[in-house]
Amino acid sequence: MTPHDQDTPPGPPADTPSGAWRPGDRFRRLYGEEPLHLLILIVSFAVCGYAALRWRSDDWLSIVVWFVGAAVLHDLVLVPLYAGTDWILHRAGGRRRTPDDPPRTAVNHIRVPAFVSLLLLLVYWPLILRNSPHYSVSTHLSDTVFLRRWLLITAALFGASAVWFAVGRYRTRPRGRTTRKER
């Protein structure tokens, strides 16, 4: 918020036609976002509070240790790993030859399938590594299929991303060449 915004009273700006101003504009000017944003935040905090109350047990210390450990692991290990990998991918992609060349978007075509694949690995870690003895007992299903399926999903994600990238490059290729018949 700028000092100028603090001096102006809430309501329609002076240069706004009276029919173009809506009641939600005042809230948007004061809060900075749409009312739906605030509603989603309130619901999110309510769900988190409910989950915290449901987890309340005699073992609350292990929950606190898990949250702190996850935050430290993410901030001190994973974020530098993400940033370093992203830096390497950008450096490997090279620079534009001229300012008119389109930016190389191959990094996003690596980043997105890698993120989805690692997210699936994080969620299904015990099953992929066959480190979940209770799964087979509880479900009467085999846990031997998860590694193979995760690898197939990862290959399909990277394959689809490569096809998408190739089609995008094909569609945006320069078309300035002429053939002998056109000359």
Image (cartoon, rainbow, N blue to C red):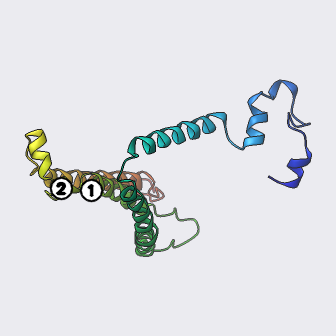
Q: Residue at x 87, y 54 (%)?
A: 3
Q: Residue at x 77, y 27 (%)?
A: 23
Q: Residue at x 59, y 68 (%)?
A: 99
Query: What crowding class fits label 2: few (fewer than 14 Cα within 10 Å), some (14-19), or many (20 or more)?
Result: many
Residue type pointed to by label 1:
Leu
Q: Where does the image place residue 165, in percent across and percent down from the top left?
A: 37, 55
In this rendering, position of residue 17 left or right of residue 173: right
162 and 52: which is toward the camera: 52
156 and 2: which is toward the camera: 2
**Quadrant where the C terminus lies?**
bottom left
Q: Which mark is residue 121?
A: 1
Q: With respect to residue 100, does 33 lie above or below?
A: above
Identify residue for label 2: 128
**Given contact means CB atoms under 8 Å apart, are the residues at marks 1 and 2 in contact?**
yes
In this rendering, position of residue 137 left or right of residue 90: left
51 and 4: which is toward the camera: 51
SS for callout 1: helix
Q: Where does the image place residue 37, in percent across and percent down from the top left?
A: 61, 39
Residue type pointed to by label 2:
Ile
Extreme residue in the front direction = 58
Q: Where does the image place residue 58, in percent across and percent down from the top left?
A: 36, 51
Instruction: Specify whether residue 151 is in view.
Output: no
Query: What crowding class fits label 1: few (fewer than 14 Cα within 10 Å), some (14-19), or many (20 or more)?
Result: some
